[in-house]
Image (tube, rainbow, N blue to C red):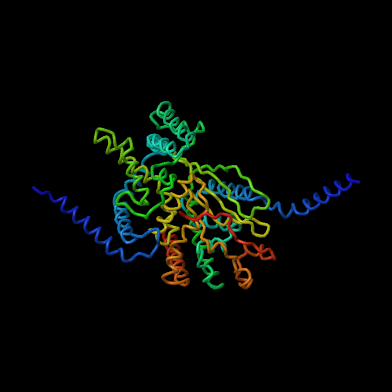
Amino acid sequence: MKTRLPATFKRLVCSTLMVGVLGGCATSGNPKDPIEGFNRAMYAFNEGLDTAVIKPVAQGYDAVLPMPIRTGVTNFFGNIADVFIGVNNILQGKIPDGVSDLGRVLINSTVGLLGVIDWASDMGLEKHNEDFGQTFGRWGVGDGAYVVLPLFGSRTARDTVGFVLDTQADPLTRVKRVATRNSLLALRIVNGRADLLPAEKVVEEAAIDKYSYLRDAYLQRRRNLIHDGNAPREVDAEADQVDVPVKAELPIEAVTPELRSDANGNSVTFARSGTDTAH
Amino acid sequence: MKFLRVLVANLSIGVVVAISTPLMAQESPDVLVKNVTNEVLEIVRKDKDIQSGSVKKATDLVEVKVLPHFDFTRMTQLAVARNWKQANPAQQKILTDEFRTLLVRTYSKALTEYKNQTMTFKPFSMKPSDTTVVVKTLIKQSGGGQPIDMNYELEKSGEAWKVVDIQVGGVSLVTTYRDSFATEIASSGIDGLIKLLQTKNKTGEVASTVKK
């Protein structure tokens, strides 16, 4: 006997894929985003789901729960995540960081009451951000194409593989009792979404096209994380050789006040010291 | 005699240092960033209007305290990147004005979302010959979670230091626009980008006045 649900689901998948394929013609030719049409369709789907379900729940959650409890929830999931953050640090050869992460788990799981209180940070053991995608990046695997996954959002091809491993390794997915596991996963999603609410408002103010803004921000963020905050500057070769001609060519009233100070014969060259280009 | 020469040499170095100090000592970049951010955050902490989301009031604060230390022409040039040369001076001027509006709005909005995060400054060092420096800070969230890096990139402009980029968690307030600006210019030229920025700035204003 067939149920109706799979048929509906099949139709949904088909139509989504169709939109993706048709939309594929409308790419803007960004080499980092070869399947932009598909990605935009997925992005629209995710946004729809977020607006309809996840965001309202997160807003309610944010409004209801007092700050100390929110902090406790964030810390609890952060403590679980620290296990594989430590493993990834060790895989990347950053042994002291990895040991520190595992030390964090030890301290926070015990005196931190199952991770709810982050004593380790107060003791000077800094929280890190690592995952398998970053480990691959550290090992020299390039980004690959940008892709928007249904439900899970922005990834690169490399980070999609990393993400599968992260999910496999995730202790939460190993919780045996289904109801407990699902509740925990749902709580983690809602709590994580609520943490993003302030940033989202800023992005909406900043973005001209939210899709491409989030894409480019994501790519920069990942690049920065792989280099642990010390990414070599991304250089636009031609732009950086330019010695801005504005000062010489613009009539003085057109020059912004900030520029007048260096218009006094001090020519400022804008050559960049960094030489590394994006990988 | 040798002693005298050394003395004279030292004195002349001293004089040069003394003459150049008032010019050079235009605050070092890290002190500049520290003073400005501390001052601004102090005001935000006390201002109930900004905390409850008044973008207008935050913008006024930014205009007075922050903007004099930003080089918007340079920021726009970094965002428009290789296409900057394509734009004529008049277009460059309009682009700068519009991009300035967008950045100011974004920065002000971010200030209204400020909720008791604490900011610490990472150790800073520079050579006297440096013309580009990065002042690194760390933002600690009040709600737990990992602290976020916030870096200010400054360039020496004449004798003063000007901020030319801010990166939050590695995401640049300026270069994040590079690809979308390039795409827009490729499809509808410099004027297309100007129009796009103008539309965005106008709709943003409408939205924010409605909200108030």
Q: Residue furthest front?
A: A140
The x and y percentages for residue B1 are 91, 46
Q: In the rendered image, which quarter contains the C terminus of chain A? A: bottom left
User: Residue A160 vs residue B74: left or right?
Assistant: left
Numbered circles on residues, count: 0
The x and y percentages for residue B71 are 58, 60
Q: Residue at 27% of width from left, 62% of height from top?
A: A21
User: Residue A275 vs residue A211: left or right?
Assistant: right
Choose between A132 and B177: the one closer to the eye: A132
Image height of A249 relative to B135, above or below? below
Q: Is residue B143 visible?
A: no
Q: Is residue B194 visible?
A: yes
The x and y percentages for residue A104 are 44, 31
Q: Residue at 31% of width from left, 63% of height from top?
A: A24
Q: Residue furthest top?
A: A111
The x and y percentages for residue B11 are 84, 49
Choose between B50 and A160: the one closer to the eye: A160
Residue A129: which quarter of the image? top left
Q: Residue furthest left?
A: A1
User: Residue A193 vs residue B166: left or right?
Assistant: left
Q: Residue at 64% of width from left, 62% of height from top?
A: A268
